[in-house]
Amino acid sequence: MLIALNNQNKHVLAHEEGKENKVHYLCPVCKGSVCLKKGEIKLPHFAHLQSEKCQVFSEGETEEHLIGKRVLYNWFIQQGIPCQLEAYIPSLKQRPDLVIWLSSDQPCAIEFQCSPLSIKRLKERTKGYNNAGYTVYWILGNAFFPKKSFTASQRAFFTYRQDLGFQLYYLDALKKELLCLVHIMEEEPAKKLSYQIIYFSLIKPKNSVSKLIGILNNFKKGQQLNTNEKGAQHLLYCHFHLNQNRFYGTTEMKKFQHYLYEQGESLVTIPKEIYFPFYKNSGIKTSSYYWRYLIIEWLALKGEGAVF
């Protein structure tokens, strides 16, 4: 942790304290003894003594997490935004990395998540903040950056805006740069990731919170897939992909095939519209082949000229 209580019961920052000072530091939450660690390699921070047990502050923070919290704290403070580092909320028994006030009546909890967090715990913490009147923003570390596809853990951090689609926010702590992933999609059948990145430096003098909000509000979506450009080649590829999954026997394909069999259909007889190029919102886990077939089936039952 980056903050502790000194002999005068005042909050102090680790990087502002000197190792030569003979001060007895305490944890702001459990009031247990902590020591100042200020070496040549790791960022200055406080750590509980081995005999102390704290239910809120966990030991073993990564260097990325320590640096990231300090980067965000400095960025907010330099703009004159009220900010508390590692503020403990007694009613929730939770300690967000930062609490800021963008307006006098709207506190915001900022969490810089670098280590694994279960989806259940993520939902509990988010719900707790919201119920207490806090808007919560989750900013992810490098370990959460997508590779070939999004995991369930990564999807759990998605937020959605109608103009920006699904979004994720990352902090490169060393570069002191925010990465805003917007319009997150997956192209089927290969599940190829598609997203646009807004790079926002936190060390440029004029790069403020209000400027970031303005960039997001005015961001224009890049040109998406033009289905007319794919043509017959894409239809053949999609059909090949479905057949390949059939032979390998994926769980999703078995479920789709079983449903087709019950309807007296097969991969050969289903409407070609199901094979059309499609960018799927990454928040939708079910294959688009399956739900597109269900929609076409539903429309057929409605009949031509139906109003709905």
Image (cartoon, rainbow, N blue to C red):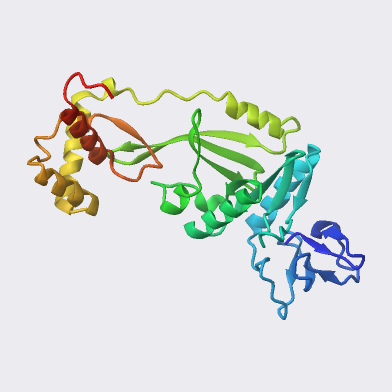
For this orientation, the residue located farthest to the front is 307
Classify residue 86 as left or right of residue 170.
Answer: right
Residue placed at 88% from the left, 61% from the top?
10
For this orientation, the residue located farthest to the bottom is 51
Residue placed at 46% from the left, 53% from the top?
153
Q: Position of residue 45 (x, y in %)?
A: 75, 62
Indicate whether 148 appears above or below 120: above
Indicate whether 228 appears above or below 151: above
Mark yes or no: residue 118 visible.
no
Q: Position of residue 152 (x, y in %)?
A: 42, 52
For this orientation, the residue located farthest to the left is 264
For this orientation, the residue located farthest to the top is 305
Mark yes or no: residue 18 visible.
yes
The quadrant the N terminus occupies is bottom right
Q: Position of residue 51 (x, y in %)?
A: 72, 81
The quadrant the C terminus occupies is top left
Residue placed at 62% from the left, 46% from the top?
136
Q: Position of residue 73 (x, y in %)?
A: 74, 47
Label total for image: 0
Residue placed at 64% from the left, 56% from the top?
65
Query: Closer to the camera, 145 or 121?
Result: 121
